[in-house]
Image (spheres, helix red, strand yellow):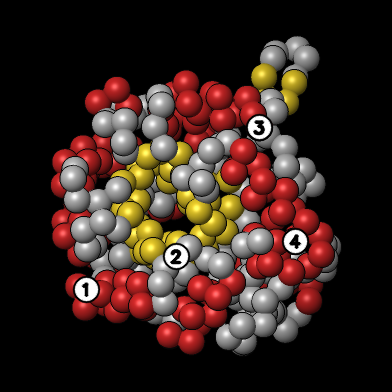
Amino acid sequence: MTLQGLQYFGARGDDTARAVRDLGCKVCRVQLFTDHDDAALVSNETAATIDNEVLNAGMMPYVIIRTPEQVSQVPPGHWIEFYNEPDLEQFNMPLSQFKERYMTIVEACAGRNPLAIGGVSNLNDRGMRFLKQLEWDKIPPEVACSHHWYPDDDRPHESHIETGFLHKKRNTRDQDIADLKAIVGERPLVNSETGFWDGPFRTESDVAEWYRVERHFWERQGYAIVIAYQLDSEAPPSDPNQWGPQHGYGLRRVGTVSDWKPSADAWFA
């Protein structure tokens, strides 16, 4: 069974946590750093506040960490993910550093926490190249591989990968998942970010239908967890011409506790 979850940045208050639970959300993805560097790790107290807010509402925390030392901040039994989009240079985790850390984290989580490794930004050529450089044959098969999946704006449910030389042919997404399994082996799979944004060029109804299609796709692929990005949008810009995806990703309407867009019902149906 695939668990549908939601990206849930920081402590949002018990009212919000209960409202998210009442939608049918089972998993909240939270993180133990406030920026993508080792100097911005949250304190044990902050980690416990975020964790308890999710737990007290009856949901499971899915916790992104950056360093091996952070494993001890996550209670036993809770999911851990290492790391967030390490294939992107702006997130400051060179491959060499990633490799230095992940086996230590595997050992620290063994018998203690379910673990997902990868977190690449998309199932595209860049993301697949990054995953190929990890030593999956040395990673226990119970450790999940995680990744993100975001669409091209004009192709909401198509692969990003093209094959062929003279005559380009686009993969199907079933082929993408088969290629992923060929890299990482038989192990649980997690899509820890996927999302669509509404705004001037697409309606809330469009986005709801896209979420409905995505939910069925990942369920059919047998994923353990799939997480929608995200709970809230950024506040709308004063100039409508400055509207961007960050202003439309939220599943609830800005400034409310439980005024949900149609996408929320589609995702947690």
The circle drawn on residue 28 is 2
Task: Please name the residue that numbered disc 3 is placed on.
Answer: 173
Alpha carbon distance from label 2 to label 1: 19 Å
Task: Please name the residue that numbered disc 1 is placed on.
Answer: 43
Q: Is 183 positioned to the left or the right of 32 in the image?
A: right
Mark closer to the chain start, 2 or 4: 2
Q: Nearer the viewer, residue 138 or 262?
A: 262
The mark lying in front, picked from 2 and 1, is 2
Mark closer to the chain start, 4 or 1: 1
Q: Nearer the viewer, residue 177 or 35?
A: 177
Mark closer to the chain start, 4 or 3: 3
Q: Secondary structure at mark 3?
A: helix
Alpha carbon distance from label 2 to label 4: 20 Å
Q: Secondary structure at mark 2?
A: strand
Task: Please name the residue that numbered disc 4 is placed on.
Answer: 208
The mark lying in front, picked from 4 and 1, is 4
